Amino acid sequence: MKAQVASVNNKTHGLRSWIDELNNAELPAMAVVVHDLLRLSQSTTASVRQLAEVLMRDASLTSKVLRVSNSVYCNPGREVVRTISRAVVVVGFDQVRMIGLSVSLLDGLLKDSPREQLQSLLARSFHGAVQARNLAQHVCQQQKEEVFIATLLLNLGELAFWSRGGKPADELVGALADVSVDREKLVKRMLGTGFDQLTLGLLKSWNMGEIGQLVQASQVARGPAAMAVALGAELADAVAADGWASPAVQALIEPIGSLTGLPPEEAWRQMLGSGEEAVRIAGTCANSDLKAWIPRTDDLPLDLSDLLQMQRESSAQEVRPIEPMDDAPLLQPDLELLKLSLQNLRLMARMPTDVDSALSSVMQALHRGAGFERVMLAVLAERQSCFKARKVAGKGSEGWLQGFTLPHDPSSTLAFARALKQRSMQVVTPFELADQPLGDLLLEQVGEGAFAVAPVLAGERQVGVLYVDMRLSGRPMADTQLSVLRKVAELAGLTLRRLSQG
């Protein structure tokens, strides 16, 4: 059979030729399992025995379903599951069926050595399918599994081509390297058909016409189920293209809220929650590292709607200056700069360049990105006996580089030591330092007012703390800003740990 797959060549041209070629490439076996599991989802009398019979046709599929059923995500109590019937008791009938569907589709398409185009597209399809299924629970509960499959197979023609396309797929990759070409026209010229037509043709040949009808309906968003498919896929594409903080993703909050009847804040939380769910499921259902292709929501350390609200209201806040101010405008959070800074830090945490570049991104994220007026990285120095300023940002902070020194006593209750000992962020009010040892010394160096510190930990090694305040204007620190501080401190520690490992 593998020799047959390898025979795909440039003579394959046109819709019928490609359907025949791909149907000779072991994909129909996957389609049979998916079709039978879908049939069970549409039956009101489906039994555990029928589900087990479908899954147990393939020993490898059974093994993987049991492995996923024993995972922490599906089985947090870690009750040992050795049979499909036991999995149904512990995990649930619908969940086991969904695991079977996911494993069948992912394994069938990712077989052998998947190319980058396949993994990227399949990750988007899987993320969109989870989003769409969770939307369907609000508007068409009975069709949620059909919605899941339709969204996952929305790009079946392209997925199958990248999975089993052989030499023509290699040639298309090369042709698409020219970013100036019209992608759709190029595909039709090289294959003799478009990916959309190939999708519908394969679904029809696999006896999955109802899913094909839902795929077609989603193109015009006709009906609740079709709208769920369309919005789930659009959201996954937008996240993959520009991340969770992008305007394209934010623009989908309103239509998703309108479809589900959820207020904007709840619609946004559902979008994020479904994104995390997709990462967890992909991590357990796929042999390939598919979850690495789905942007993580914990890369977005704040509720963007709250931050935008903070930006709108910050100019209206009561300002209580602690010292004379000039006429310069108040520092405001820069959401786009914050997004770029966090992306840089995440990249450096995986592939660090140098310490100065990493620390510059840290300062930029906190000062100009999150809008903290003064920022300092205070590192442990002189055999961890004291804190000294290593990097600073903000008006009036330059003197800290030469003048800031704070003795370090690990048993101290002062926020700097407490943050490292408890491995957690500390927010300090102006009144908390009054009776503390070293409190007066700290006040002399940074002045009065509230501040926050977050520990920077390179694994088990204590590097120091990130200090932030809003002392110049006297404005309060917003919860969204503090969320950024917590996340940036974590990324700084990961980056410094990677750098120390060479």
Image (cartoon, rainbow, N blue to C red):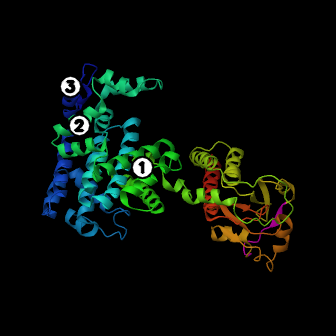
**Amino acid carrying mark 2 in the image:** Leu
Label drawn at residue 266: none
Q: CA distance from mark 1 to mark 3?
A: 33 Å
Q: Earlier in the sequence, mark 1 or mark 3?
A: 3
| Magenta stretch bounds | 404-412
Q: Earlier in the sequence, mark 2 or mark 3?
A: 3
| Residue topped by disc 2 | 200
Point 30% across, 61% down: residue: 69
Point 65% across, 50% down: residue: 334
**Amino acid carrying mark 3 in the image:** Ser
Of badges 1 and 3, the one in the foreground is 3
**Element at badge 1?**
helix
**Element at badge 3?**
helix
Res 419 → quadrant: bottom right
Q: Percent from the top left, x then y, of residue 475? A: 73, 64
Category of crowding for the residue at label 3, using alpha-carbon neighbours closer than 10 angstroms: few (below 14), some (14–19), many (at least 20): some
Is there any visible trace of residue 73 in the rendered image?
Answer: yes
Of badges 2 and 3, the one in the foreground is 2
Point 46% across, 58% down: residue: 268
| Residue topped by disc 1 | 291
